[in-house]
Image (cartoon, helix red, strand yellow):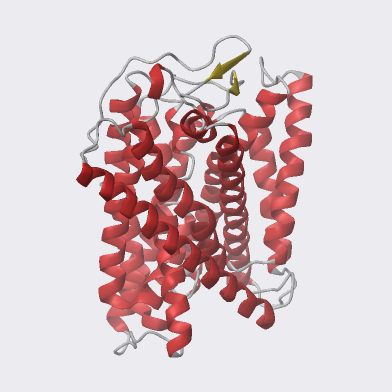
Amino acid sequence: MEAVNGGGGGGGDGGGGGKESMRNGDHSCVDIPETAHQISSDSWFQVGFVLTTGINSAYVLGYSGAVMVPLGWVAGIVGLILATGISLYANALIAKLHELGGRRHIRYRDLAGYVYGRKAYSITWALQYVNLFMINTGYIILAGSALKAVYVLFRDDHALKLPHCIAIAGFVCALFAICIPHLSALRIWLGVSTVFSMIYIAVAFVLSIRDGSKAPPRDYSIPGTSTSKIFTTIGAAASLVFAFNTGMLPEIQATIRQPVVSNMMKALYFQFTVGVLPLYAVAFAGYWAYGSSTSAYLLSSVNGPAWVKALANVSAFLQSVIALHIFASPMYEFVDTKFGIKGSPLAIRNLSFRIGVRGGYLVINTLVAAMLPFLGDFMSLTGAISTFPLTFILANHMYLIAKRNKLNSLQKLWHWFNVLFFGCMSIAAAISALRLIAVDSKTYHAFADL
């Protein structure tokens, strides 16, 4: 295995006038447009908080049920630790390629296009779009579930159903997207997001520990038949890689100041040390307290004062709104760049464009979220069809191609092993996730009130 220590490197800021063509060997040229968004302006600490916000989003409230229940104690703990280390390694490979060929590659598809050519540029963008669309859909499901949880704490008339809550969540997400023009503009909102994260993580952890200390012995056996256990285990593996990876590392790295590689490595080390501890705490505490009966949304399992649970759910709702904006930003950057949306965010043309385009995009997200509100299944499918290929398969193969003259035979064999292994895992996980969605779709109708 090759070491992936961050090295500096003095590339340009990315950008330049109009479009720039880049060529690697005999591959076809790919036209790279200058971004309309702000780049090269953020400290590694701010970028570290962007990454940590993604890890400790309200998705952490689902890992007790989506990861620990199907895997059990031993496989769950080992799996989380392995996923942490493997994800750090794969993300470090991508980070080291950011200045490949003497220039910055500020989009994942730009990097793939440079390494492979035009077709890979388009395929990578399609994979990334699917990945981010599904993550955004999951965030709207999470935000809607949090709103529904607040409602049922104080009312039991079932008048406000989950699809209604998802619609409200989508509307709030659209308002936030219209107000925040680009990823670097989050700034203070990252601090706000961290506060919200700490609130629902602390509440979930403390109430789970309290419930677990009072409860009788729990059942930690893995539920299901022998066949279903195979599929749920594979699905949990996909959820593991989903937990730690963004699928948009070059876009996040584009915002960091020079030296971009060493600064990004600092942000990654922050993400995969300090950043993963809250995730571990919630996942393990929830499973310890409720065993195999842990729900897909941990705050639905905990017992405690209504106002405390309401505070946690409101925090989860608001943090999901902020986190969604991070994962929607590559799509926003694409359309803003394509249509030349620059200058003051409050200019009439720019504001109306964001209202129409971002609002329309989130309307589609919200509709899909309301129709298929199966959060665990979305995590598994997203991990299978996009997180595995983007983070593990492409990262190892691009590094193999880019550094082939500097790698020895053992290092090349290691990267090929990763490509093949995660390729097989991706196929198996996709089959498993589709099966889970098919099963849940038979149990619940479209626009179900879960």
- Viewport quadrant of the C terminus: bottom right
Q: How far across and how far down the image is residue 180, in percent?
A: 61, 31
Compared across the picture, whether 313 is left or right of 95 comes to: right
Residue depicted at 59% across the width and 32% down the height: 118
- What residue is shown at x 38% (from left), y 15% (from top)? 11
Q: Most extreme residue toward the front, as rendered? A: 26
Does 304 sit above or below residue 214? Answer: above
In the visual, does 4 lie left or right of 145? Answer: left
Question: Which of the pair 78/375 is nearer the observer?
Answer: 78
Count every numbered label the image shows and give the total.
0
Residue 195: x and y, percent?
A: 42, 45
Residue at 30% over, 54% down: 84
Of residue 212 and residue 116, the one placed in the foreground of this image is: 116
Any part of residue 171 in sight: yes
In the figure, is residue 191 to the left or right of 280? right
Residue 356, quarter of picture: top right
Image height check: is 170 above or below 283?
Answer: above
